[in-house]
Image (cartoon, coloured by chain):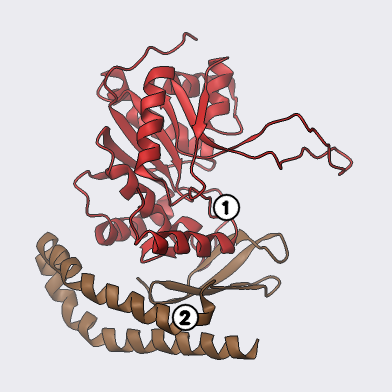
């Protein structure tokens, strides 16, 4: 999925209006959302143990990665091979960015 | 209109409505395209439908501007045997439903489809067991929705005060709403001629088939992503079931 921060319109539980929200993820885990109208932030329910949750989820992602890659390779071998070098280069950066988000969340949690 | 006949062998189509009606601009996307536990919100319900044997076809209704993202998403996230047919919807939920029914009209006419499930793409968690129960009921009765009894709902007066209706029982309507295919197609075609728009699919059906329409207990996990908080709740449910809803 894209590394951009997704934005979508939802009903805000802070200002109770249909507003644009930002959705911040660390890998597959949604860490928090922010209302762009009132600034209301909703945090993940397992905030207390986010690094642990993230690492658990990462393990599962890594376990299923070979199967997912094999499926893509079988379906569209040329597209898969063409995209592979870029994907390999981007992977460490992606993981580093995710871990940075997790640590930032942990710091924010400590200051709340 | 006449009461729909019973269906002996259900041959169903699952329609997921992901066209939305909210305003979108700039970098915004529809909430059904938000990531949820590693997949986009709408692909979870397509995967549930794909696990139900009597569902022969899957139709995804989108807005044209979401087509590229939709095709990329399906390529990455949907690997079931049954293909997903992607069509363009309208500006409202009602128009999108009509577009889907008209797209399916040839199959409904020739009898290769006899049950239609219309599902809100913003409800990612639908247990296949619930879908099976709905199809079974709709084959017998012609129309059924999943509902959750909610005795806490109170009507609001025009002046903003709350009415207390102690004896009233309310059901919170969920989706998929499931219908005899010919009956729902004829209702929507007649509604188009009459310019009638119901509050939801069942209300349009009942307008043209008075007295029809049942409900069966839904599932509390079948939540609609409305508030950002709902996305966290859906993620928690998927995590707790090891990403496999049954």
Q: Is residue B221 left or right of residue A90?
A: right
Q: Quadrant of residue A29?
A: bottom left
A81 or B167: nearer the eye?
B167
Question: SS for tag 2?
Answer: helix
**Horizontal and vertical percent for residue B177?**
47, 33
- Residue at point 41% right, 82% down? A52
- Residue at point 43% right, 51% down? B125
Task: Report the chain shown in brown.
Answer: A
The residue indicated by pointer 1 is B22
Q: Quadrant of residue B154?
A: top right
> In this rendering, is residue B8 above or below A42?
above
Q: Chain of mark 2?
A: A
- The mark found on residue A96 in the picture is none
Q: Chain of mark 1?
A: B
In the image, which is nearer the foreground, mark 2 or mark 1? 2
> In this rendering, is residue B120 above or below B7?
below
B170 or A74: nearer the eye?
B170
B191 or A95: nearer the eye?
A95
The residue indicated by pointer 2 is A50
**Horizontal and vertical percent for residue B239?**
40, 64
- Residue at point 36% right, 14% down? B6
Chain B shade in the render? red
């Amino acid at each position: 999925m894209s590394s951009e921060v997704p934005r979508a319109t939802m009903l805000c539980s802070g200002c109770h209006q249909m507003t644009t929200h930002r959705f911040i993820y660390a890998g597959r885990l949604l860490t928090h959302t922010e209302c762009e109208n009132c600034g209301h932030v909703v945090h993940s329910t397992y905030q207390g143990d986010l690094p642990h949750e993230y690492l658990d989820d990462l393990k599962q992602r890594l376990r299923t990665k070979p199967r997912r890659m094999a499926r893509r390779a079988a379906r569209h071998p040329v597209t898969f091979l063409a995209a592979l070098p870029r994907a390999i280069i981007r992977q460490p950066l992606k993981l580093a960015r995710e871990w940075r988000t997790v640590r930032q969340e942990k710091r924010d949690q400590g200051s709340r | 209109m006449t009461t729909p006949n019973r269906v002996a062998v259900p041959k169903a189509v699952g329609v997921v409505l992901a066209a939305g009606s909210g305003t979108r601009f700039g970098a915004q996307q529809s909430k059904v395209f938000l990531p949820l536990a590693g997949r986009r919100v709408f692909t979870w319900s397509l995967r549930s439908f794909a696990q139900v044997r009597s569902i022969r076809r899957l139709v995804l209704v989108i807005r044209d501007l979401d087509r590229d993202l939709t095709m990329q998403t399906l390529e990455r996230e949907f690997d079931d045997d049954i293909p997903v047919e992607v069509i363009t919807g309208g500006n409202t939920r009602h128009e999108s439903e009509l577009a889907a029914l008209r797209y399916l009209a040839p199959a409904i006419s020739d009898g290769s489809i006899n049950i239609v499930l219309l599902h809100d793409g913003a409800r990612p968690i639908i247990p296949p067991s619930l879908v099976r129960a709905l199809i079974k009921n709709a084959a017998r009765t012609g129309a059924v929705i999943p509902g959750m009894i909610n005795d806490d709902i109170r009507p609001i007066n025009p002046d903003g005060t709350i009415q207390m209706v102690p004896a009233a029982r309310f059901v919170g309507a969920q989706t998929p709403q499931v219908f005899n295919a010919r009956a729902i197609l004829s209702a929507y075609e007649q509604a188009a001629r009459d310019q009638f728009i119901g509050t939801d699919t069942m209300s349009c059906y009942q307008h043209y088939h008075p007295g029809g329409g049942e409900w069966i207990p839904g599932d509390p996990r079948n939540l609609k992503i409305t508030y950002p908080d709902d996305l966290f709740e859906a993620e928690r449910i998927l995590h707790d079931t090891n990403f496999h809803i049954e």
